[in-house]
Image (cartoon, rainbow, N blue to C red):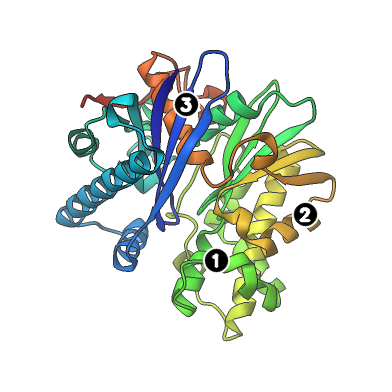
Amino acid sequence: MTLFIGLMSGTSADGMDAALVEFRDGSAPKLRHACGISYPAAFAQQLRQAAVAPQLPAAQVMQLDRRIAEISVEAINQLLQQSNTPATAVSAIGSHGHTLRHIANDQQLSGSSWQIGDPGWIAEHSGISCIADFRRRDIAAGGQGAPLVPAFHQACLGNSSRPRMVLNIGGIANLTVLGERLLGFDCGPGNALMDEWCQQHWQQNYDAEGRYAACGQVQPALLQQWQQLSAIQDYLQQPPPKSTGRELFNLQLLGDLPACPAEDIQASLAQFSCDCIADAVQQHGHADGEILLCGGGIHNRDLVQRLQQALPAHQLLSTASAGIDPDWMEAMAFAWLAYRTLNGLNGNAPAVTGARGERILGGIYPA
């Protein structure tokens, strides 16, 4: 039996998730304990602005890089204390870091993905070896470096006798189609646009349970306008493998919004997220069966109801029904990736990322 810690800071930029995961030969990974640290409001705002800023001063990046590492160590210490686990019992930490940029298709860069959160600092101040920078080796092998979690979905949830998909609704939504041929890709804005609108108009990080959206009226003309934006249309029509980030899905790209109730804009953004996801399922997913939900969006009742209405042939369930807490799925996945790296096993799924083959991912920073 071995223990690994997974750390995840998602595109919503609301906090750091930490998961302590147990691995036994022949058994599925088991969540021992998990915790989360919310980012201070000013720091969260810095991260959100950095994600869409056209330029980033080096000093600002260095400051954010160190602060993410410091918060990572805080999360690790809290996790170990709450679970009564000594640092010496943990084999390694798998740190996703926080994404500043993810540009999958760029002629000059040939694809690039940039995560901050100094792994050397994490190893030094936690006393545990840290494995990080999981995406760039896949990119070097011709892949997009994302999404990485579908390989974990396949390992833990791919044994169903029914058609099964996994839908992670984070800042960006991504869909995993499980089966003989694994498929996984980013399929739309998820919570990102709704969260951004909430932060601007109600000074709240997100729309709790989708209450604002549920009070609004969808504006069909707005939906059509957004769907016809060339950058968004090109991405949504592109076949997998594909991945994206806040560079594409942000309110600034949507252009000027009409003078109507803020709840109507929120309802329209919720419907836009729903339509992007439903279209991806209908184009590339199973015709029926289970869709297991995870990520923060599972708590948005309005969005889940919209999805169920759009996908009546599918049964929408929490990943908890298959034994994995939906709030800690991604943190667990990066513990799993660290386990794979330390044991000399590939972490990518070439069918998902488009890489030329399986690769051992990440760099190891010894304690």
Mark 1 to mark 3 CA distance (whole Å): 35 Å
Give the amino acid type for the residue marked by disc 3 in the picture: Glu
Residue, x 44% and y 76% (percent of image)? Answer: 203
- Quadrant (top left/top right/bottom left/bottom right) for the N terminus: top left
Q: Earlier in the sequence, mark 2 or mark 3?
A: 3
Where residue 253 sits: x, y (%)?
47, 64
Q: Give the numbered dot on residue 194.
A: 1
For residue 22, the mark is: 3
The image shows residue 18, relative to residue 161, as above or below, that is below
Q: Would you say 56 lies left or right of 207 here? A: left
Please tell me whether mark 1 or mark 3 is closer to you in this view: 3
- Please, what secondary structure does the residue beneath circle 2 have? helix
The answer to which of 131 and 177 lies nearer the viewer is: 131
User: Does residue 143 appear in this view?
Assistant: no
Quarter of the rendering containing residue 89? top left
The Cα atoms of the two marked residues, 2 and 3, are separated by: 34 Å
Name the residue: 24% across, 56% down: 56
Which residue is at a point 27% across and 43% down the rendered structure image? 73
Label 3: state its secondary structure.
Answer: strand
Determine the residue located farthest toward the right in the rendered image. Answer: 313
Q: Determine whether 7 is above or below 195 in the image.
A: above
Q: Secondary structure at mark 1?
A: helix
Q: Which amino acid lies under the numbered mark 2 shown in the image of this protein?
A: Gln
Q: Earlier in the sequence, mark 1 or mark 2?
A: 1
Q: Is residue 83 left or right of residue 321?
A: left
Pointer 1 or 3: first along the chain: 3
> Which residue is rendered at x = 46% and y = 31% of the image?
21
- The residue under label 2 is 308
The amino acid pointed to by label 1 is: Met
